[in-house]
Image (cartoon, rainbow, N blue to C red):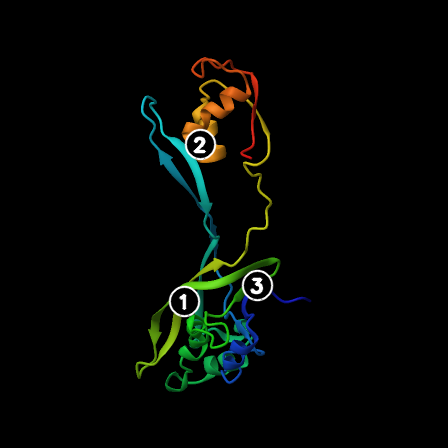
Amino acid sequence: MLGMSKAKIKVLDGAQSKMFTVSAAISGAGVVPCVFNPSDFSIERSVNYAQHKIPGIDRPVFQYISGDAEIMRFSLLFDTYSAGVGSAQPGIIASTAAPDAAKADVRMYTEPLMKLTTVNSDTHTPSLVEFVWGSISFKGYIQSISQRFTMFNMFGKPVRATVDITLISNKTDNNVRNSPDRTKARTISDGDRLYAFAYAEYGDCAEWRRIADENNIDNPRRLESGMDIVVPPIL
């Protein structure tokens, strides 16, 4: 019978992954296994717009500026006090069976994650990592990480901790964009204005005259809905 799929964080920078092989928390070079799977995670993405206020209109003209990288957030629980066989890690299983005074320090298992924010001497950036859980995969860099200790043994040794992690995607944009050196067709809708087309295509509201001349438009304030126009290239 197949066991439960365990989440893990893989270190994708080869040189950086070597620093973890001496830790009892690591199962294989460059892999930080999760003691428990996260109960939930979130993925966020946002885009940025500039608002340009034009005299004589009651709403600004919006210009798309850029998209932000995807952000993934999740929390991981680490427990050397009572995780038991469910952890699937021999060191934690042994710690669970040990008396209170002999419980393993949970920082053995959280510190490898904290080290992922250390700058790699080869790339001069923190390590590129991948969060993997079954069919879920998210590659990027740790943007922020914090550990909160919630249980201690009789000598004050931390034996349970929650680690909050925020990853920022390293995905690049390979989409091909249209450019203002190509002729484009547009259909007029109610409320459309030539200066808005000009700003969207050329980055300059004053270029509305170029569109008007191309389409033989005498009065740019009287555009008919459904009318097809062309936006000429800048040569």
Point 56% across, 16% down: residue: 227
Point 62% across, 58% down: residue: 135
Q: Could you say which disc has been placed on residue 199 in the image?
A: 2
Q: Could you tell me residue 98's position as x and y percent?
A: 45, 85
Q: Can you identify the residue that label 1 sits on?
A: 163
The answer for how far apart the CA atoms under marks 2 and 3 are is 43 Å
Q: Could you tell me residue 33's position as x and y percent?
A: 53, 72
Classify mark 1: residues with Cα within 10 Å, few (<14), some (14-19) or many (20+).
Answer: some
Point 38% across, 83% down: residue: 100
Left/right placement of residue 78 relative to residue 27 reads left
Amino acid type at mark 3: Val
When asked about the image quadrant of residue 162, the answer is bottom left
Q: Can you identify the residue that label 3 sits on?
A: 132
Q: Secondary structure at mark 3?
A: strand
Amino acid type at mark 1: Val
The answer for how far apart the CA atoms under marks 2 and 1 are is 46 Å
Q: Secondary structure at mark 2?
A: helix
Depth-wise, is mark 2 or mark 1 nearer the camera? 2
Amino acid type at mark 2: Tyr
Classify mark 3: residues with Cα within 10 Å, few (<14), some (14-19) or many (20+).
Answer: some
User: In this view, which residue lies farthest toward the right?
Assistant: 1
Q: Could you tell me residue 6's position as x and y percent?
A: 57, 66
